Amino acid sequence: MQGLMPRMGIRHQLTAKHSITFIDMAEIKCIGILTSGGDAPGMNAAIRAVTRSAIFSGFKVKGIYRGYRGLVTDEIVEFSTANVSNIIQRGGTILKTARCKEFQTPEGRQLAYDTLKRHGIDALVVIGGDGSLTGARIFANEYNFPIIGLPGTIDNDIACTEYTIGYDTAMNTALEMIDKLRDTTQSHDRCSVVEVMGRNAGYIALNVAIASGAMAVLLPEKEFDMQRDILDKIAETQKTGKRHFIIIVAEGVGHAQEIANEIQARTGIDSRATILGHVQRGGSPTLRDRVNASAMGYQAVCLLEQGKYNRIVGMKGEKLVDYPVDEALEMTKSLDPVLVDVCNTISI
Ligand code: F6P
């Protein structure tokens, strides 16, 4: 794994031109961790890595339950290394999670700040998706409070990283389900329209479409035309003798049932819609998610230890990266056009 930082000795190499915000290391004694937004497999591995790295480096660690809500309502427990044993293989998050409306208000954030002060927590590691990291950014800027963000969401829609925690597992779970669907779709000469998660992004959809050998994929990033992208393709594929069809629809496109109904009405092919839904958020994390989450959790503590804070950690290939939170959350990324081509070319 490249990009891992040595535990000490980096600080003297850093200068103001790197636009890094420094805090006196001596000021940070206790790190709080929370998971927020939709859960994602690998969050536990990240909690474990942050806790163990922090304790190893002499910090106190406090687990905050139910995301930002736990800060508002004061649900906080001190963690030892034992609190995080036997969790690396478990899906979900032992810290629980929530989407907290109150934290979106200045009054809610004031309550959160008061709770942090009461517990002596002087830095926060936030594991979550776009909304959760945006919350951390606002809080950090408002209270000048040290935060490190770890991208945790199955959607992979955080631009500063190629892989978010949970994305790999969710894709593999969806793939396993689609492989099973193919069996019954084939036996009945049917068309299966399968909706996968991803919020407004098509990362899961595109990758599982390629990996499952789907006939077509509908992505929120690309306009689609029913006649051209589905009906003509079915007709063409039928000429080769094919009698069953798998179509992947990204959640951001939606309407799986309507699409299945239209295919049936216009082709006569018996069609079914399957919405995979929250099953994609569960299950034991893959090796990739465990390794990424462990490395990112370790890196979060290294950054705090070196006095670098208000940053988001990410993965670029095998390399760990980190960016100032303001810059990280302004970045954009898009689907790899080559993968879109791969999918369209070999999907017939
Ligand atoms: O962000 C993760 C995600 O699972 C999205 O793919 C989906 O749009 C959303 O969360 C579902 O949220 P909820 O669990 O609140 O239904």
Image (cartoon, grey):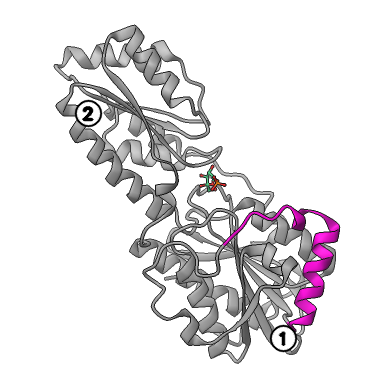
Q: 132 or 269: which is nearer to us?
A: 269
The residue under label 2 is which amino acid type? Thr
Magenta highlight range: 97-120
The residue under label 1 is which amino acid type? Met
The extreme bottom residue here reads 58
Q: Is residue 161 magenta?
A: no
Q: Which mark is residue 185?
A: 2
- Is 344 rendered above or below residue 78? above
* Residue 4 pos. (x, y %): 50, 75
Judging by the rendered image, the residue that carries numbered circle 1 is 25
In this view of the protein, can residue 328 be seen by the observer? Answer: no
Q: Which residue is rendered at x = 48% and y = 76% of the image?
A: 48
Compute the Cα span from label 1 to label 2: 59 Å
Density class for disc 1 (Cα within 10 Å; few <14, some 14-19, many ≥20) is few
Under circle 2, the secondary element is: helix
Under circle 1, the secondary element is: helix
Q: Is residue 111 magenta?
A: yes
